[in-house]
């Protein structure tokens, strides 16, 4: 880890005889040598690289031609080879390029180079390094940089803390994320919705719904405008904690704030109702999702089917399952599993058997769960006194 302590002033070296090296940012305003113009060009490369990388990832995956952030770093490396003294401004722009490209190792290397060249490191360059570590899911390195900033007597900004909290969120370090939020309050810095959302998401991913709701309450008490991201994280936290009532309460609050809910928020609410065996609320949320002109997905529908299965509502479960092809969605193994289980709980072995045939037709592979469920349905039907059930191994094979 590069040291960020301010270096002691060193005696000036005598100027070399011959061609004088150009220093970026000193004198020349020409497009080829001006520090501001070079740094601005590197910054444009960073921004274009980010957008280009997103487009390429959507069409080509991770592979593809060199992105603009790589061009920015190449420009930075070429500056030294042209007898140009690379200053702190260009180092900071190159650090931004590393952040865009998630090149956290290169970012740390650049900070090390700045320390070795006795260039003064400021909060902006440190924030760029922390951002690269955060995007690279390196929470330890991000927090180490934050600690180095304090040792160098640099005052961390809200951006610094935001990168630290986001890094902890990505690394599943919810306690460290909350600790940074407490430290941020003590530093008398103004907190925003973005950093709160990162903290809420950190608690959600770790299954701590109480802490997530506590942070969301702080957002509202501070009269900050909570966004869909923060509400969605809170709803997901309630879903993981099987707190369906809190999840529905947050959904109502989002509607009251006139924010546009997305499919992720609805899916989390439906899953919360599923875990609480609240099949009626789950179906109502599915209806709202359709009325809101949002596209249904297999995840939310499967959660609704599972809610009906848990409550023993096999007719509703089959109705939802039949709705999937109408919505041009392909039922998953989870969808069929919930439908077969719903039929099994209500001793509807004929319906379960029909679903198993359908499952084979769509080339999804059944597993031991289905056989167990069907056998359970058969046993319940026999105990009920029916003589119409004739289950056998040969029947199972014919399916």
Image: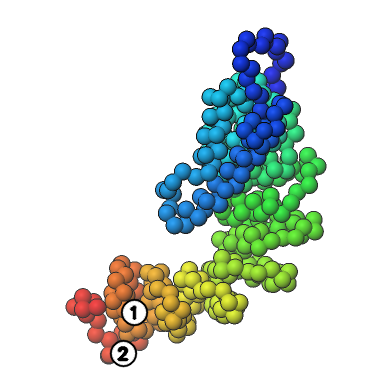
Q: Position of residue 75 (x, y in %)?
A: 55, 34
Residue located at (28% from left, 74% from top): 360
Question: Which quadrant would residue 111 be assigned to in this image?
Answer: top right
Q: Is residue 44 left or right of residue 221?
A: left
Q: Is there a contact, CB below 8 Å, between mark 2 and mark 1?
A: no
At label 2, counting other C-alpha atoms closer than 10 Å, the crowd grade (few under 14, some 14-19, many 20 or more) is few
Q: Position of residue 100 (x, y in %)?
A: 57, 44
Residue located at (73% from left, 43% from top): 158
Quadrant that contains the N terminus: top right
At label 1, counting other C-alpha atoms closer than 10 Å, the crowd grade (few under 14, some 14-19, many 20 or more) is many
* Vertical relation: 25 (above or below) 367: above
Residue located at (39% from left, 70% from top): 332
* Vertical relation: 360 (above or below) 150: below
Q: Position of residue 200 (x, y in %)?
A: 65, 54
Q: Does residue 291 appear in the picture of this structure? A: yes
Q: Does residue 171 appear in the picture of this structure? A: no
Quadrant that contains the C terminus: bottom left
Residue located at (75% from left, 55% from top): 218
Q: Secondary structure at mark 2?
A: loop
Q: Secondary structure at mark 1?
A: helix
Q: Is residue 215 left or right of residue 69?
A: right
Q: Position of residue 367 (x, y in %)?
A: 31, 67
The answer for how far apart the CA atoms under marks 2 and 1 are is: 21 Å
Q: Circle 2 sits on which residue?
A: 386
Colour scheme of this structure image? rainbow
* Vertical relation: 377 (above or below) 149: below
* Vertical relation: 390 (above or below) 271: below
Q: Earlier in the sequence, mark 2 or mark 1?
A: 1
Q: Circle 1 sits on which residue?
A: 355
Q: Is residue 77 left or right of residue 194?
A: left
């Amino acid at each position: 880890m590069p040291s960020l302590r301010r270096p002691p002033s060193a005696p000036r070296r005598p100027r070399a005889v011959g061609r004088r090296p150009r220093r970026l940012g000193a004198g020349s305003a020409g497009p080829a040598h001006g520090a501001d113009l070079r740094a601005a060009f590197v910054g444009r490369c960073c921004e274009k690289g980010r957008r280009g990388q997103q487009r390429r990832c959507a069409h080509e995956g991770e592979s593809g031609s060199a992105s603009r952030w790589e061009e920015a770093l190449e420009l930075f490396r070429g500056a030294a080879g042209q007898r140009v003294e690379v200053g702190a401004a260009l180092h900071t722009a190159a650090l931004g390029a590393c952040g865009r490209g998630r090149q956290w190792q290169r970012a740390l290397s650049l900070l090390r180079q700045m320390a070795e060249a006795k260039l003064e490191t400021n909060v902006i360059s440190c924030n760029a390094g922390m951002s690269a570590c955060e995007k690279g899911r390196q929470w330890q390195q991000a927090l180490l940089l934050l600690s180095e900033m304090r040792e160098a007597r640099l005052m961390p900004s809200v951006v610094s803390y935001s990168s630290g909290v986001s890094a902890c969120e990505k690394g599943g370090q919810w306690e460290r994320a909350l600790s940074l939020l407490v430290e941020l309050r003590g530093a008398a810095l103004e907190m925003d919705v973005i950093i709160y959302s990162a903290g809420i998401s950190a608690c959600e991913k770790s299954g701590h719904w109480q802490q997530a709701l506590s942070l969301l309450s702080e957002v509202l008490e501070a009269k900050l405008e909570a966004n869909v991201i923060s509400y969605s994280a809170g709803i997901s936290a309630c879903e993981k904690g099987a707190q369906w009532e809190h999840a529905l309460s947050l959904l109502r609050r989002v509607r009251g704030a006139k924010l546009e809910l997305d499919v992720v928020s609805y899916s989390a609410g439906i899953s919360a109702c599923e875990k609480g065996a609240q099949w009626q609320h789950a179906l109502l949320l599915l209806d709202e999702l359709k009325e809101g002109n949002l596209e249904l997905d297999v995840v939310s529908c499967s959660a609704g089917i599972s809610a009906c299965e848990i409550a023993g509502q096999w007719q509703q479960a089959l109705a939802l399952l039949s709705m999937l092809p109408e919505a041009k969605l392909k039922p998953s193994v989870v969808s069929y599993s919930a439908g077969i289980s719903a039929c099994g709980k209500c001793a509807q072995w004929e319906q379960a058997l029909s679903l198993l045939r359908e499952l084979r037709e769509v080339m999804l592979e059944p597993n031991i769960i289905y056989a167990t469920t069907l056998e359970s349905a058969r046993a319940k039907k026999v105990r009920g006194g029916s003589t119409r059930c004739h289950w056998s191994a040969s029947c199972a094979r014919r399916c």
